[in-house]
Image (cartoon, rainbow, N blue to C red):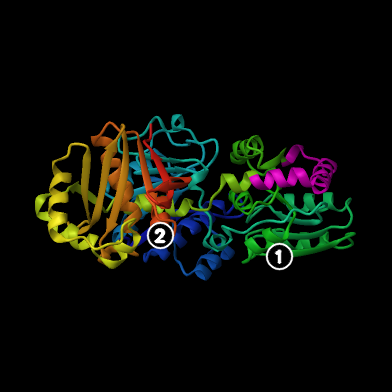
Amino acid sequence: MMCKQLLIRADGNAQVGTGHVMRCVALAQGWRCAGGDVLFAAASSTPALEERLSFEGFKFIRVETSPGSTEDATGTTALAREHDASWVVADGYHFGANFQQRIKQAGLRFLMLDDYGHAQHYWADYILNQNLSANPRLYSARESYTRLLLGPRYVLLRQQFNQWETWKRDIPKIGRNVLVTLGGADPENVTRKVIQALASLRDLDVVVVIGGSNPHLDVLRSAIGGLPFALRLVVDADNMPELMARADVAVTGGGTTAWELAFMGLPSVVIVMAENQVNTAVALAREGVSVNLGQHQQLSAKQLAAALNLLLADSARRQELSRRGRELIDGRGVQRVITRMYKADLSVRRAREEDCRMVWEWANDPEARAASFSSDLIPWENHRSWYASRLSDPSCFYYIGTNGSGNPLGQVRFELKDGEGIVSVNVARSARGKGHGAALILRSAEQFFAESTASVIHAYIKPDNTSSVRAFEKADFDDAGAVEVGNGQARHFVLRKAV
């Protein structure tokens, strides 16, 4: 097991909302799937939020401190050491430069989730900004070791969405099923305004989802009486993908749910619920994923009803919004982020002469032969000659990956051809199924880029080798489609050097 304990420091309540905690839940689910444990620590939360974390099976600790303060950093460091945390994750705009610096000075690995470059300086190992507006210029004041994970390819979706990756949406000519979901708290009760706007429409079937931290439940229950259509109020829904699949249009805020809707291909109208949602709402509309209705304070019920009615009647528009959403969010963001966190535990070194037999044994493993384009066993003498030629060839960059204890995990070989790399990977049998493959690919690719003049790496994989396909997707390679290799087909993946 590569990862142990993950400590997540995030707050949520009726005032600031629950989005920071909920997107961390997605990361926590991925970490747990990889065999690790997760501890959430919060200075502010709600009973409903704590119940949700308990339902997910995560440990929770309430910390009595001012969020983002020096005392908070000291306490977070103490918690990380007490629980032997491999990584600390912080999500919230109060975790500024001082907090980050103290976490790193304690020798901890640190991932910072951010939305708009709020800190004066960044000390984290990784900054994750999943927004379309994410730009390296936001983080020009950062440490030399700090790496950026920017844009929607790193969107953190909860585990329950995984099974919907290949699902196809039907677009009816006239839509009537509406999903309203405006976040876990909605302190200004914008949900009630939406219900009032819907009251002017007919022939609808509406589901309104609110979080358990919403303080307006009784008011909302009163508001749904006497409507000219069916409306169901759901508190703390545990089946959001199904509700999204059932709907034809959604009314949502510009927070985490907007990414989930895009992944599900559900056309949406976005209402800006807070200042930090403005950029997301604008960018999603610019990308043709949703309709931006602006800030809720300036939005009238009549404007909302008109925009929704127009979208429900326009199947071509809904089809296009749905397509663009699916193209934007592929649902693999959690895997990509965790692969980078895993990578911190790996090292690569150049292959040596004494590795020859070990590499030969790896190569002749039955699973390795089945995944190769040539499945024949490799004779020892043939391997010895080939291996010596690879070590002496300056266009071959041959690496052995090792774990934190120096134990070999597998080999990654790059052949430099016409200024670009072609990669071959083989993970040792003892290391398979533990997340090592993707991390080893990514770590070796970084080493290859650093040591060669190449700026592009190509991978060719047998179509039925699903484990390798997944590993290269997690390692941030882009799918370039199918190609001919020899006498057969291959999946082609490409990685370009970060600039």
- Residue 141 is a magenta residue: no
N-term mark: 2 or 1: 1
Mark 1 residue type: Val
From the image, which quarter does the C terminus lie in? top left
Q: Nearer the viewer, mark 2 or mark 1?
A: 2
7 on left or right of 409: right
| Above or below, comparing residue 40 to residue 451 in the picture | below
Label drawn at residue 234:
1
For the record, the magenta segment spans 296-323
- From the viewer's perspective, tell me whether residue 315 is left or right of residue 22: right
- Mark linked to residue 473: none
Magenta stretch contains residue 299: yes
Q: Nearer the viewer, residue 284 or 9?
A: 284
Mark 2 surroundings within 10 Å by alpha-carbon count, few (fewer than 14), some (14 through 19), many (20 or more): some
Which SS class for mark 1? strand
Q: Is residue 378 visible?
A: yes
Question: Visible in this render: residue 71?
Answer: no
Please state which of residues 330 and 424 is positioned toward the viewer in this rendering: 424
Q: Secondary structure beneath disc 2?
A: loop
Q: CA distance from mark 2 to mark 1?
A: 42 Å
Circle 1 Cα neighbour tier, 10 Å, few/some/many (<14 / 14–19 / ≥20): some
Do labels 2 and 1 touch, CB within 8 Å?
no
Residue 259, horizontal then vertical, whole percent: 59, 49
Q: In screen coordinates, is 251 left or right of 155?
A: right
- Quickly name the residue at label 2: 465
Q: Quadrant of the N terminus?
A: bottom left
